[in-house]
Image (cartoon, rainbow, N blue to C red):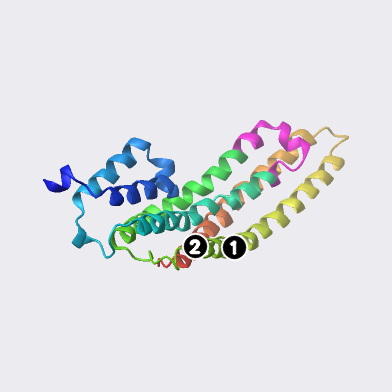
Amino acid sequence: MQQILFPNWMLFAGFYLFLRIFNPTRLYLDNTSCLAIAIMLAIGLEREHLAQPATLLWVIAAVTFAFVCSVPYWLSGTVGCVLQQMLLLNEQSVQDHRFTDESEALAKLCSLVFVAYALENGAVFKPLFDLILSRHLVLPEVSFSSLYQTVVENMQMILIISGKYIILMLVITMCCGYLDLFFKKASLSMFVTPNIKSIVIVILLNIWLFHDQFYVFNKTMKSLGYE
């Protein structure tokens, strides 16, 4: 009864800010849901359930921890965005509504696949449990320098993975340009080159992209200390 009448407001602030900053909960939970979860945790959890007392420093560490844990989700759609820009590299692709619509969906698909992997693995819930148990909440471990290092390390990996798509899509664009010249007199370029691009993108999605997203998921989660 005392917890209901006098909840720990520092505990509430830490959980609420974490839920509003952590990428999956920020995107898929509205403000009311985050507020309700934070209130429930502030009422239900007692001091003995926490490894560290809920102080202002704990709230600051929780906010920084939310940023650090969001890095993989922020970067998960990068490969899809690279493919999107490569698809829209030339004027013909921009004029084709199939590529403008599907390429935008492709960037969102990468993020959704990443979240699906996280849900299946349970990794999306682990930061919240770590927040309750106060793991990884020592200020030197969740400082802005550690956030910067996490972003840089993961960006280097994403850059290497995106490089093969950049090279491949440039080659495809050049080849389709030559096909345009070859079929110009036969007036076939209007439907030959988009169809070739569509076939290649479907192959990339089925062979490379989903596999690469799983690889990115494993590497980024290991960088956060989650197996």
Q: Nearer the viewer, mark 2 or mark 1?
A: 1
Which is more N-terminal, label 1 or label 2?
1
Res 212 quadrant in image: bottom right
Q: Amino acid at mark 2?
A: Thr
Q: Residue at x 82, y 40 (%)?
A: 180
In the rendered image, residue 156, in percent from the top left (x then y), is placed at 62, 63
Image quadrant holding the C terminus, namely: bottom left
Label for residue 220? Answer: 2
Q: Residue at x 71, y 51 (%)?
A: 169
Q: Camera-side residue: 122 or 207?
A: 122
Residue 188 appears left or right of 79: right
Q: Which residues are magenta?
A: 86-102
Q: Camera-side residue: 43 or 200?
A: 43
Residue 122 seen by the camera: no
Question: Which residue is disc 1 drawn over?
Answer: 152
Residue 224 seen by the camera: yes
SS class of the residue under badge 1?
helix
Position of 74 relative to 220 (above/below) = above
Position of 110 relative to 211 (above/below) = above
Q: Is 87 within the magenta?
A: yes
In the rendered image, residue 177, in percent from the top left (x then y), is placed at 82, 44
Residue 130 appears left or right of 2: right
Residue 9 appears left or right of 147: left
SS class of the residue under badge 2?
helix
Question: Badge 1: few (under 14), some or many (20 or more) residues near its Cα, within 10 Å?
Answer: few
Q: Amino acid at mark 1?
A: Val
The total number of labels drawn is 2
